[in-house]
Image (cartoon, rainbow, N blue to C red):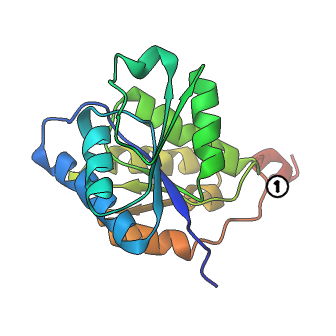
Amino acid sequence: MSRELKRLCVYLGSNPGNNPAYVAAAESVGRELAARGIGLVYGGSSTGLMGRLADACLAEGGEVIGVIPKRLVEKEIAHQGLTESHVVNSMHERKQLMADFSDGFITLPGGIGTLEEFFEVLTWNQIGYHAKPCGLLDVNGYYTCLAEHMDRMVAEGFLMADHRRMVLTSPDPGELIDLFAEYDPPHVDKWIELKKGL
């Protein structure tokens, strides 16, 4: 049975990156969400990939909700044309509110902050705080090395294979959202020692 996806949170860079493919992918995600009637939740910036994502979704009549900390309102230049804007006091509050608004989490290319956001919601999923799909839009192989490293985590005994499979991956926004709709979370504990009876 397909899960209902009313809004999806997208994590991505506040810089545009050096490859035009990244901007094209951000815009494609924005258009895809609007076409499907799925609201966008993101970090509220008008800069970089974040701004291009929001603009593309808004241009197609999509709902866009931005959440940005006071400290970043001027640095990232808060987007002034969103459906809803929420200015919060901290990064922790930002991430929690974005998660509360969303039915799943898509990660596009970005830097340290983007990865930190992705791994936090993935960890919440792993330990049972939520059961929402988490995915990587692998634009131009940007996340190939990350996927390989997660495979090594499994091989080295730090990550269960069932939890590795929680990371849905595709280079195509439509395909990734389809995977989200069919996502069935694993029902296993995080702790490998307990499973092995050690």
Query: Helix, strand, or loop for circle 1?
Result: helix
Q: Is residue 195 above or below residue 152?
A: below
- Circle 1 packing at 10 Å, graded few (<14), some (14-19), many (20+), is few
Quadrant where the N terminus sits is bottom right
**Residue 132: x %, y % from top left:** 63, 59
Residue occupying the point 77% across, 60% down = 188
Which residue occupies the extreme bottom position in the image? 1
x%, y% of residue 128? 76, 51
**In the displayed structure, would residue 161 be above or below residue 80?**
below
Q: Position of residue 126 (x, y in %)?
A: 69, 50
Question: Residue at left 34%, top 72%?
Answer: 35
At 64% from the left and 61% from the top, the residue drawn is: 162
Amino acid of disc 1? Lys
Residue identifier under label 1: 195
Q: Is residue 90 visible?
A: yes
State the image quarter where residue 173 is shown.
bottom left
Residue at the image point whose x is 88% and y is 52% from the top: 197
Q: Quadrant of residue 195?
A: bottom right
Closer-to-camera residue (135/84) = 84
Q: Residue furthest right?
A: 197
Drawn side of residue 121 relative to residue 168, left or right = right
Is residue 191 left or right of 104 when viewed as pictured? Answer: right
Image height check: is 67 above or below 130? Answer: above
